[in-house]
Amino acid sequence: MTAAIPRAKVRPADRIFSGSTLFAGVLILAALAAVALFLIVQSIPALVADPAELEGSPTSFWAYVAPLAFGTVWAAALALLIAFPLSIGIALFISHYAPRRIAQGLGYIIDLLAAVPSVVFGLWGIKVLAPFMTPFYDWLVTNFGWFPLFAPPVSGTGRTVLTVAIVLAVMIIPIITALSREIFLQTPRLHEEAALALGATRLEMIQMAVLPFGRAGIVSAAMLGLGRALGETMVVAMVLSPAVVISFVLTSSTNPSTIAGNIALKFPDAYGVGVNALIATGLILFIITLVINSIARFVVNRRKAFSGAN
Amino acid sequence: MTTTLAPATTGITNTLTASRLPKWATWAILGGCLAVAAGVFAIVQLSTGGDFSIVGAVFFGTVLFNIMLFALSYLVEGGRQARNRLVTSLVVTAFLIALIPLLSLVWTVLGNGIARFDPAFFSQSMRNVVGEGGGALHAITGTLLITGAATLISVPVGLLTAIYLVEYGQGALARAITFFVDVMTGIPSIVAGLFAFAFFSLITGDPGIRFGFGGAVALSLLMTPVVVRSSEEMLKIVPNELREAAYALGVPKWLTILKVVIPTSIAGITTGVTLAIARVIGETAPLLLIAGFTSSMNYDLFNNRIMTLPVFVYTQYATPGTDVQAYLDRAWAAALTLVLIVMALNLIARLIAKFFSPKLGR
């Protein structure tokens, strides 16, 4: 007993319209594939070239990349270490502590931080934050110089990896805050009220209801923040005083540069195989951020469709 | 028969009967601790002759406040309330800490940028300027041209993709597009610039290619995902009843989308596009690579280097001439211009969302 369902007539205009929307969607996927493809194609000359032609004549291409990759991860990890507790605190403040009427306005204020262009952050970092931090670094190295992270000599300009990490932290705080705020607000109202009804203080309610519910979301928010910190360019290019080293020291004037910062500094004057080498480092950065972002999105998508873009 | 309740032996205080700190106690402790810290710092300053450190006083005052609050609350109210109060104050502190860089940034950009925020800055380029004078007209036109071109690429692609995802897409392809659009929002901007360079230098065969349209392509790579996500959200909240009413009247699907769905959500889409423009207009790294920098006007997106405002800030800072202060002043003025543009775009976006969005009956 199957009655034929009357189908609407397919008009040519419908075909054209749906076809063009499909084309646009596929174009985006193609663009992402093209990014990978063209970066790979342009990287190959650097990978097969004689390492002696690369800047600093390293023993191999990987010896050239290693300090940069280390610096990228090190600066981003420090930034995440600073930004993560603050962001969770801010997100909790906006979602569960601030008076309801002003909470949204406070959220906008934090979002304003995300709107400031990175080059302005760079200018602020080098002209305001670095001089401000210098006496602090002096004190730190004088009193805690025995600790490996603060080994002397101290940087006289404040252009250290710690200054960079602080600016990066300020830049990723709005990202982590926005995501975790959104996730905290999704906590089932009944869970919270049940905890409060049992006599829990607000802290215990958050520990029992909010944090367990949002754990996966918090982790992916942190990873998205990390991805942004890994790729941030101008702050590193402007603030850091770079060197080709692998060093954990936070307060010195010889800091490992990052991939992105190194590209911005070297690219305008690069030529020949040097350009290809920079593109190859960019390819590595692309792969690292792509993997981190994919994992974070995968985790967060299982909860709810939400992205930093809205 | 009256039995007195046995005093709690479990170590858990009953919050209903336990004594509480009075409401003014928090503020009193805060004021007291700040005053003590300020006093200590003032004494240190008098004895050593150094500068009075407001930052230090506030910092140690806050730390002292947290310790005192916890201790007093622990003694009066017990451990659970003390922990609750401590975390409350830490959470508020975290928010206030985040405000410090924002305020400091606004303050310094305003204070330093105002020096060269004059008519000459907006009417002259840097051609043949060494030292004082000159302006950022070439950079402002370049920014407008490149961002405009990027918008022209991103909005049709982004909007059509959003329509595909909401109205047509289902199955693996739509899921893949949604996923990779999200992933693309996290692509480092410098990678977008490298891609544009790699692409155009391979196509044109020019190993040192620099031109404005490449910058527009790089920016649109960053902008399109943002447009897709925001338009998608806006299309999703259009009530299905509107679509069904149109179908019931025999309107074809494509006309329904064009005449019913998009007009309903146009305010939200415009807001999203404005925010996307605000996001890419401050991008520096990709333009530094592919659009390059110059001190002259260039209206041609397809030939020669073209200056943009963010790159102007960077080059004025990074390559000062003999008169360093003049270059720094220009950098700050350009930074101020950039921040004002971004803030204006954000404000416009919020206003559009507030005044032009349709009132959906609920």
Image (spheres, coloured by chain):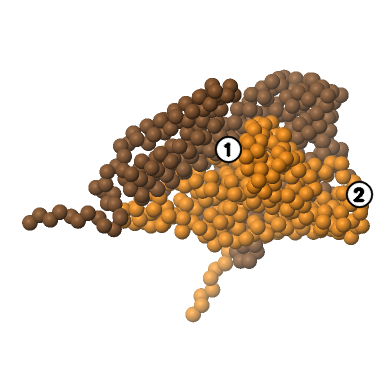
Chain colours: A orange, B brown
In this view, the mark in front (2 or 1): 2
Q: Which residue is mark 2?
A: A272
Q: CA distance from mark 2 to mark 1?
A: 41 Å
Q: Is residue A274 above or below residue B344?
A: below
Residue B140 at x, y = what percent? 74, 31
**Mark 2: amino acid:** Gly
Question: Is residue A198 in view from this perspective?
Answer: yes
Chain letter for mark 2: A
Chain letter for mark 1: A
**Residue drawn at (56%, 49%), measured in percent from left and top?**
A84
Q: Which residue is mark 1?
A: A112
Question: Is residue A31 in view from this perspective?
Answer: no
* Front residue (pair B234, B336): B336
Residue A256 at x, y = what percent? 75, 47
Q: Is residue B139 above or below residue A245?
A: above
* Front residue (pair B66, B327): B66
**Residue drawn at (62%, 40%), measured in percent from left and top?**
A143
Residue A212 at x, y = what percent? 46, 59
Task: Find numbered disc 1 in the image and state the secondary structure of the residue it sits on.
Answer: helix
Q: Residues within 10 Å of mark 1 (few under 14, many from 20)?
A: some
Task: Find numbered disc 2 in the image and state the secondary structure of the residue it sits on.
Answer: loop
Residue B270 at x, y = what percent? 60, 41
In the image, B242: left or right of A191? right
* Front residue (pair B183, A235): A235
**Mark 1: amino acid:** Leu
* Front residue (pair B136, A233): A233
